[in-house]
Image: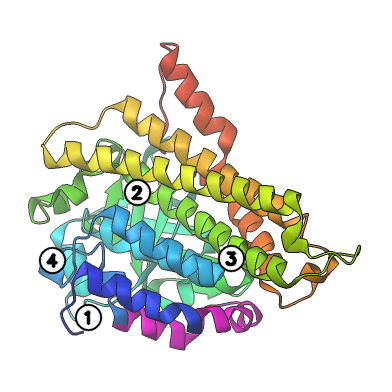
Amino acid sequence: MTERSVADVLEAVRDLLPTLRERAQETEDLRRVPDASMKSLKEAGWFNMLQPKRWGGLEASPIDFYRGARLVASACASTGWLTSVVGVHPWQLALFADQAQQDVWGEDNTTLISSSYAPMGRAKAVDGGFQMSGHWSFSSGCDHAQWVMLGGLVMGEDGTPTDFRTFLLPRADYEIVDVWDTVGLRGTGSNDIIVKDVFVPEHRTLSFNDTGRCYGPGQELNTAPLYKLPFASVFSCGITVPILGMADGAYKAYVDYTRERIHISGNKAAEDGFNQLRIAEAAGMVDAATLQIERNLSEELALAEAGEKIPISLRLRVRRDQVRSTLAAISAIDKLFVSSGGRALKTGTPLQRFWRDAHSGRVHAINDPEKAQVLFGQFELGIKTQDAWV
């Protein structure tokens, strides 16, 4: 890949948007992002954004990363989802022991990783690592990846969990089962992963006890402040930002449609004051949500750059605003969709696709609004809070 700056990558992403928009229906029909789209994103340098510089990456600000993911999702929701979720994994790999990074990037620093973090695996400590089995769902983009990060519980001799870890496995060690057939985000190819009694070396694992305190052995060589951010902040925002991008796409589709639409009354829809009001309200909700996310991440990054600990109060605010931003994006899309008329229901039209895709993204576990907000409320009231996703 030709050496690029962050600005170069974002400009290349913008240039791809018309093509990605044209491929949105093809992506949905394929139930995976087309190889040509992934090739273009790779060539643009997208998946190097959060990768360490010593591996050819850019160590970009998460703000720039999420702005790019939002752009892609505004053109094609499924491609945007994959762009964000798979694009975060180089950041996490940077936290693993150096040998794990060598294993993945040693021969090809453009190698991609998919994931499924729910602790659906069971592992037993053995000499040099762990013996592991399990069945995971929702591994977005797994068909394009050569490695996978999987959540699993380490079981003690008495059968009770002793640790919750992320396990890194090469493609030869797992099976992909094609089960992804859904009403929305159909193009993400979020299929199942099956692992049967596989050995995972110690260096290819990372404890959530460590990531919860913003630590990983990879920080010894990857010293940039970027790699001192909380995993829960980086990953959770990586789920919400594509949905904000879907709201951007739905907004554009609605405005373009309304400009030309003739209401059943015979009047121009663009002259309807209620449509004008909905446009203003939807735009305001998405803008405010985006600003909250960027403010929070900027504050976390500033603390990391100063070598200061990121307090639990800020980490809880990140999660609070992350789930609320998802709700704001959904509300904005709903507001536009319900006033768009019957023609917007036609298969292949962008508005109904964004509506389905955004609601599908909303049901991701990290978008549970009640749980994240209750944790914030508990902290404010002086009640002890503990959660792996903070």
- Mark found first going from the N terminus, 2 or 1: 1
Colouring style: rainbow
The residue type indicated by label 2 comes to Val
Numbered circle sitting on residue 234? 2
The residue type indicated by label 4 comes to Lys
- Check contact, mark 4 vs mark 2: CB within 8 A: no
- The residue that label 4 is drawn on is 53
The residue type indicated by label 1 comes to Asp
Q: Residue 63: image x %, image y %?
A: 31, 53
Instruction: Answer few, some or many: residues within 10 Å of disc 1's Cα (few below 14, many 20 plus, some between 14 and 19).
Output: few
Asked if residue 241 lies left or right of residue 296, the reply is right
State the separation of the CA atoms marked 3 and 1. 38 Å
Question: In this rendering, is residue 222 above or below 367?
Answer: below
Q: Which residues are magenta?
A: 20-43
State the separation of the CA atoms marked 2 and 1. 24 Å
Circle 2 SS class: helix
Mark 2 vs mark 1: give the one in front. 2
